[in-house]
Amino acid sequence: MRRKMLIPKIVGFYKMNTAKRINQFRNTPGMPVWQRNYYEHIIRNEEDLNEIRGYIINNPLKWELDEENPENCP
């Protein structure tokens, strides 16, 4: 159980600290930088690895259509 909680704590710490620094740099205190959740998956084999690589490569291309993209808000 303790091990299972380690990844969410690391991700939360990373997101909190990078958001703080990004907002200091932009002079936009408190503005959201990250989406609320993240996707966690154990890579079990070469097929999983290739699927995740494809996701990482193709995901930024979908940002223009993403409902969480601020440019798509009414």
Image (tube, rainbow, N blue to C red):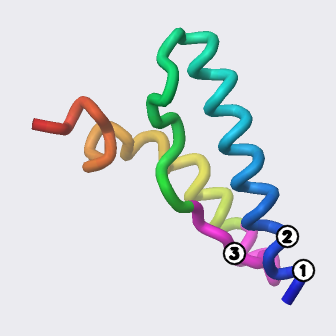
Q: Give amino acid for label 2.
A: Leu
Can you give x and y, in whole percent of width and height, for residue 46 in the image?
A: 80, 75
Task: Tell me where residue 26 sits by quadrant.
Answer: top right
Q: Does residue 49 appear to the left or right of 19 in the view shown? A: right
Q: Which residue is mark 3?
A: 41
Spatial separation of the CA atoms under disc 3 and disc 2: 14 Å
Q: Which mark is residue 16?
A: none
Magenta stretch? Answer: 38-49
Mark-to-mark CA distance, 1 and 2: 5 Å
Which residue shows up at 73% across the image and 66% down it?
Answer: 8
Task: Using residue 29 as the reference point, say whether residue 24 is left or right of it.
Answer: right
Residue 22 x %, y %: 62, 22
Binning the other alpha carbons within 10 Å of mark 2 as few (below 14), some (14 to 19) or many (20 upward) gives: few
* Mark 1 lies on residue: 3
In this rendering, the count of numbered labels is 3
Q: CA distance from mark 1 to mark 3?
A: 15 Å
Secondary structure under tag 1 reads helix
Q: Which residue is mark 2?
A: 6
Rate crowding at label 1 as few (under 14), some (14 to 19) or many (20 or more) other CA atoms within 10 Å.
few
- Measured as percent of width and height from the top left, residue 59 is found at 49, 49
Determine the main secondary structure of the stretch shown in magenta.
Answer: loop
Q: Where the C terminus falls, by quadrant?
A: top left
| Amino acid at dot 3 | His
Helix, strand or loop status at disc 3: loop
